[in-house]
Image (tube, coloured by chain):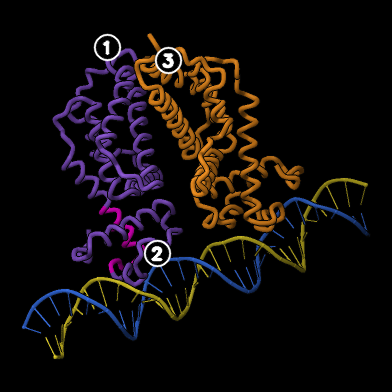
Chain colours: A purple, B orange, C yellow, D blue
DNA sequence: TCATGAACCGACCAGCGTGGTCAATGGAAG
DNA sequence: CTTCCATTGACCACGCTGGTCGGTTCATGA
C-alpha cells in the first residue's frame, strides 16, 4: 500500500486502515477527524502523520488500497468459467464476505468514492460509463439463456442484485454491531435458500 | 408541529424542516451544523434560534414531526381492508413516495432514529420489540395463505421487502439528484412489473 | 559497545467553525 | 402613532481542527 507501511506490524496496520475507513465512511472528508482516527486506531497523532504527510494523502492512499484489495480478491477467487448466474452471485457474495471480514467498512468507503465520481462526471456532463470490472463480474461468460422471457429482464436482474446487496448489508451490519464471526458454510447454505426462491421467479421451468 | 410555527408561511416552514432533515441525515447530531441548516434554508441564524431554543430542541421537534407525518400518511391512505400482500406493498410504496415528495430526507432521518434507539435498547439489554405500527402495516388483515409452502417464508418476505426498499431508495435518490418529479401513474405500472416477477417466486401456482 | 535511524509519542499551535446571543430593523395591525 | 413580533447578521467565547516538533524507545548491525 505504501512504502512506509512495509515494515509495520500487520495487525497495527489494519487497525489504522480500518479506523480510517470507518471515519471516512461515516463522515465526508472535511468532517472526518484525524483525531478520531488515531484514537480508535490506538496510535498517536504523530504516527499517523509520520506515515501519511497529510489527511488528503491518507485519503488517496486509502482509495488506492481499497480498490486494490477488492480487485485482488476478485482476481484470486472468482471462477470465470462458471456460467450459471446464481452460482456467480454466490461467489461474489462470498468474496465480499471475505473482504468485509478483514475490512468491515471498505465497501461503504468504496460506495462513497463511486458516488462522488459519478456526481463529478454528471457535473461535467460526461456520460456515465460504469466500472468495467463490475460489469464483467456480473456478465462475462454467463449463460443468460436460462432466464425466462415472459418478464422484463432488467427488472429480474434488479431484484436479484438488490436481494444479494441487502443480504450482504445485513451480514456486515451484524459483523460490526455484534462483532459476529462469519460462518461461511452457514452463509453458503443460506444463500442456497435465497437462490432457490429467486430461481422460481427468474429461470424457465 | 410547534406553536411557534403556526403562523409561518408554509413554504418557508418546509424549507427549514427539509434543510434540517438533510443536515441531520448526512451528519450525526454533533457534526451537524446549524450554520449549514440556515444557509440551505435561506434564513438567518437568528430566526432558527427564534423558533427553536437550541439545536437539541430542533432535533427533538424534528423527531416528533417526522413520526407524526408518516403516521398520519398511513392513517389517511392505507386501506386496511386489502388482504393481498402485494397490493398492500404497493400502497406502502406509494405512501412513501408521497411523503418523500414533500420531505426527501424524512425516511433517512427516521432510519437513523430507529437505529439509535435499537442500539440504545441493545446496550441496556432490553430485547428488541420492533415498532408495532410497522409490524401491523405489513401483516394486519393480510391473507398469507396465498404464499407457497415449499420455501422458507422468512426468506420470501425478506426478498419482497428488500426489493421494494431498494426500489424506493432509487426513487428518492433520483428525486434528490435530478429534482425529478414523481409520476405516480408510471410508478404504479413499474411496481406491477416487480410484483408480477415476485408473485411467481412467492405465490402458489 | 555505541551509532544510526526508524517507530512512536503527545504537548502544542494558530486558526477556523461552532452553538448561541442580542440590539436593531421592518412591516403589519390596531 | 404605538405595539408587537418576525427577521436579520454581526458578534462572541470556545472547542476542535490538521499538522508540527522535540523528544524517547528500540531494533539492528558493526
- SS class of the residue under badge 3? loop
Residue for badge 3 = B147
Q: Is residue A63 magenta?
A: yes
The subunit carrying tag 2 is A
**Residue positioned 40% across, 22% down in the render:** B153
Task: Tell me if I can see residue B149 in this picture.
Answer: yes
Between marks 2 and 1 in the image, the one whose residue lies nearer the viewer: 2
Q: Which one is in front, D1 or A178?
A: A178
**Relative to D1, A88 lies left or right:** left
- SS class of the residue under badge 2? helix
Q: Are dots 2 and 3 on a single chain?
A: no
CA distance separating discs 2 and 1: 56 Å
Mark sitting earlier along the chain (2/1):
2
Q: Where is residue B5 in the image (x, y as percent from the top left)?
A: 73, 45
Residue for badge 2 = A39
**Residue positioned 43% across, 18% down in the render:** B195
Quarter of the image where one finds residue B1 = top right
Q: Badges 2 and 1: C-beta atoms under 8 Å apart?
A: no
Quarter of the image where one finds residue B74 = top right
**Residue positioned 23% across, 39% down in the render:** A133
Q: Are dots 1 and 3 on a single chain?
A: no
Q: In the rendered structure, which segment of residues is drawn in magenta?
A: A51-65
Quarter of the image where one finds residue A194 = top left
Q: Where is residue A29 in the image (x, y as percent from the top left)?
A: 41, 57
Is the residue marked by circle 3 packed among few (<14), some (14-19), or many (20+) residues within 10 Å?
some
Q: Where is residue C5 in the image (x, y as percent from the top left)?
A: 19, 78
**Residue positioned 51% across, 14% down in the render:** B143
Residue for badge 1 = A205
CA distance separating discs 2 and 3: 51 Å
Amino acid at each position: 500500500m505504501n512504502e512506509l507501511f512495509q515494515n509495520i506490524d500487520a495487525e497495527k496496520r489494519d487497525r489504522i486502515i480500518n479506523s480510517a475507513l470507518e471515519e471516512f465512511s461515516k463522515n465526508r472528508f472535511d468532517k472526518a477527524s484525524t483525531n478520531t482516527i488515531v484514537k480508535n486506531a490506538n496510535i498517536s497523532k504523530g504516527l499517523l502523520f509520520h506515515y501519511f504527510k497529510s489527511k488528503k494523502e491518507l485519503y488517496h492512499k486509502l482509495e488506492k488500497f481499497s480498490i486494490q484489495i477488492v480487485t485482488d480478491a476478485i482476481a484470486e477467487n472468482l471462477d470465470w468459467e462458471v456460467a450459471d448466474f446464481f452460482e456467480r452471485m454466490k461467489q461474489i457474495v462470498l468474496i465480499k464476505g471475505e473482504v468485509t471480514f478483514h475490512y468491515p467498512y471498505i465497501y461503504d468507503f468504496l460506495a462513497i468514492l463511486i458516488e462522488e465520481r459519478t456526481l463529478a462526471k454528471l457535473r461535467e456532463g460526461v456520460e456515465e460509463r460504469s466500472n468495467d470490472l463490475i460489469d464483467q463480474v456480473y456478465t462475462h461468460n454467463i449463460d443468460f439463456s436460462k432466464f425466462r422471457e415472459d418478464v422484463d429482464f432488467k427488472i429480474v436482474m434488479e431484484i436479484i442484485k438488490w436481494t444479494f446487496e441487502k443480504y450482504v448489508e445485513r451480514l456486515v451490519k451484524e459483523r460490526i454491531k455484534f462483532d459476529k464471526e462469519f460462518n461461511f458454510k452457514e452463509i453458503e447454505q443460506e444463500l442456497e435458500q435465497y437462490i432457490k426462491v429467486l430461481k422460481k421467479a427468474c429461470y424457465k421451468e
